[in-house]
Amino acid sequence: MKDISGEKIMSKISYKDAGVDKEKGYEEVSLIKEICKETYNDNVLSGVGGFASLYKLDNNIKNPILVSGSDGVGTKLKIAIDMDKHDTVGIDLVAMCANDVICLGATPLYFLDYIATNKLEPKKMAKIVEGIKEGCLQSKAALIGGETAEMSDMYQENEYDLAGFMTGVVDKDKIIDHSKVKEGDVVIALPSNGIHSNGLTLARKIVKDIKKIPYDTYIEELDKTIGEELLTPTRIYVKDILSLLDKININAIANITGGGIYENLQRVLNDKLSAKLDVSNVEIPKIFTLLKDWADIDTNEMYSTFNMGIGMVIVVDSKDKDIAIEHFKDYKAVCIGEIVNGNGEVIL
């Protein structure tokens, strides 16, 4: 065999030899095509398998505005990898995007994912995508496409990373842009169901380095292993918030992610308003109490890092407080404060 210059080539090398197995890629696409179809609706014109996907907008929105968000799962993935449990982190991936998009009042339309891995293992990838599918079903989004990259020279053995992208739609007149937040509005907390997907780097350090607890260790206070607790999927609030919007106006929504309630609630305040809060009536999940005690963490640091039992915050007119709390009775939503004159602070 000779190259184009006429020089004799002594050896051959394939893409597979370099670390990319195309056949495994074809197998994976075949598996996930069927998974994705479970999320399709009549607006999906083309899904997984092409160069791009097509989605038709409904005609019943007077002035449609597209709302987009992109996110990942962070170091929660390291726990999933260590435990070899991959069926829930896909829910987290969708949740991180969907819970952001809903903050503007947008209805999720479709979702795309990106999975980068050391070695393509179709069955493992299918488990991840099963989780993504479940997250899409919970958030009313169609899973219409994505990308899987096999990069053995970028990731260690068994490692992978996830990223997601969601697009939603809202009528221009119904955008929740927090411009209507005013003095006297009330702040209502929608409880989290655990640690969600933020603060896991600190949580992992406490569990692995300080307490030196294996993830499969049963913790009596949690009634499960510490790994199972940390992998509890992020709650998705989309459907219930959308149904509340049919009843009342919501002046602002804050997704309590990285930075805790301080940083995220501050995003919906202008420089003439503050949020005065009392969170004593919020039930704090036991995982946060354990992490605080195990590492003797300052309370302010806890609220600046973790959600501390508050997954989402909505700000509504005081006259709508009871309607909102009743609407979220299954969540055990509680009023935690009010909007007051101030300088953009969150006062806890």
Image (cartoon, rainbow, N blue to C red):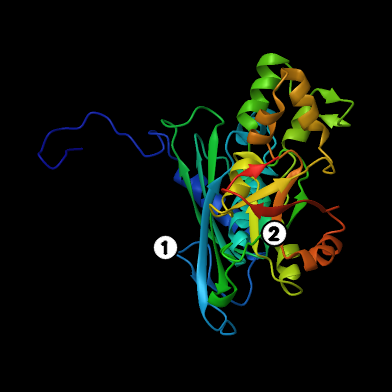
Check the image and name the residue furthest to the front: 341
Q: In which quarter of the image is residue 329?
A: bottom right
Is the residue 247 above or below the residue 118 in the image? Answer: below
Residue 34: percent from the left, percent from the top?
A: 63, 61
Is 232 left, or right, of 171 in this rendering? right
Residue at 79% x, 31% y is 287
Indicate the secondary structure of the residue bearing disc 1: loop
Is 116 left, or right, of 199 in this rendering? left
The type of residue carrying mark 2 is Val
Which residue corresponds to mark 2? Answer: 315
Quadrant containing the C terminus is top right
Residue at 68% x, 21% y is 206
CA neighbours of label 2 inside 10 A, class few (<14), some (14 to 19), many (20+): many
**Residue 83, numbered circle:** none
Indicate the secondary structure of the residue bearing disc 2: strand
**Residue 51, numbered circle:** 1
Is the residue 211 above or below the residue 110 in the image? Answer: above
* Residue 169 or residue 337, whichever sits in front: 337
Residue at 64% x, 40% y is 260
Q: Is residue 318 visible?
A: yes
Check the image and name the residue furthest to the left: 5
Is the residue 238 above or below the residue 255 in the image? Answer: below
Residue 74: percent from the left, percent from the top?
A: 57, 37
Residue 160: percent from the left, percent from the top?
A: 54, 36
